[in-house]
Amino acid sequence: MPIPPSLRTLLRTIPTLAPVSDRAVLSVSACNVQGKQTYGAFLHAQGRVLYEAFLYKSPTSSLSSTESTYLIEYDPTPSEAPTLMSLLKRYVLRSKVRIRDVSEEWDVWAAWGSEEAKETREWNWARSGAVEPVWRTSEWPWGTENGTILDRRAPGMGKRMLVRKGEMPADASTHELAGKDAYSLHRIMHGVPEGSVDIQPMHAFPIESNLDAMGGRMFLFVSPNTILTRPVDFRKGCYVGQELTVRTYHTGAVRKRILPVHISSPASLPPYISIKPFLPSTTDSAAVKTPRLRGSSTLLSTIIAPGIGSSVGLALVRLEHLRPDIALVAEEKEGQSWKVEPWWADWWPEQPPDEVHDLNSLA
């Protein structure tokens, strides 16, 4: 299911600069701290996501030549998860590590549309449906410029920057300035989940949330002075929540994925509305529910599609419902219902036939 032709006009390809809202920044400083700029997540012991986050090297110099400072950008929306500040402080013990909330010092910006060449990737598939990008480069894929991350979550996402509060990024002179909704639309059209609405703390699994395909890494504090990041490694390594993640990769089946969706509603909808599958009746024009169709999908972020008269968003979709003969309908509590049409983002790799599970046979 490729992107519907009517929605392709929503893909903004001109050089664009936009602020990213609803993000907080923590500063972690210590002597001889180790780590690289990247994207990833903190998991709890049962393998569910606590926070998805970006890890930057601070673009400003430390006062001490031996001290290093890293900045963690994340969604601070209150949830069932412990605060990220309290989570990190568990690892400090008596060491001289400083953790501060510096959200009032930094703004987050995204820039895209200026890539010199179309990015191509190689992929490593598992029979479970998990997939990993293979980086064929000697350079660190997430970039080495302090305070700027190459956004490798999906081709075309551009880059992400931390800029001093109130200042404009250097790209403002070469990019068209857009609002925060432009960035939200950009990531939704590329099928990239972000924040606590899309990757719900204490509930979301990393593979179902596409962290494997987006090259996400698991943040691991092995000592107060060492920030390690490991990929969603299915063969070796050690991180909190690894056991369940690895078991899913080797012996399970990925039954759900976060996909971009087109919604017939002319307005954006609240998150977590249930999306139910229906088979059109052969005797009646009305859709009737069929017992053979198990479970439901869940609507996540949504936004109005400019000039289309409908909306787009992301949804956690049961893959067994991705059949041409199945209609998906989001039902609100007020009784209104809206047609939902998922699609695979252009960059999403095609799974080799010999690696595909029949999900209907795995019930």
Image: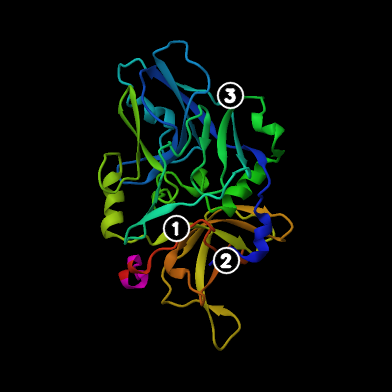
Q: Nearer the viewer, residue 255 or 274?
A: 255
Q: Is residue 169 visible?
A: no
SS at badge 3: helix
* Marks 2 and 1, the one that precedes in the sequence: 1
Tell whether label 1 touches label 3 (CB within 8 Å).
no
Q: CA distance from mark 3 to mark 1?
A: 35 Å
In this view, the residue farthest toward the top is 64
Question: Mark 3, residues whose alpha carbon is within 10 Å: few (<14), some, or many (≥20)?
Answer: few
Using residue 90 as the reference point, say whether residue 107 is left or right of it: right
Tell whether label 2 touches label 3 (CB within 8 Å).
no
Q: Quadrant of the C terminus?
A: bottom left
Q: Nearer the viewer, mark 3 or mark 1?
A: 1
The amino acid type found where label 1 is placed reads Arg
Q: Bounds of the magenta span?
A: 355-361
Which residue is label 3 attached to?
A: 104
* Res 35 → quadrant: top left
Q: Does residue 168 show up magenta in the picture?
A: no
Residue 66: x and y in percent read 39, 13
User: Looking at the picture, does residue 321 appear above or below residue 316?
Assistant: below
Residue 51: x and y in percent read 43, 39
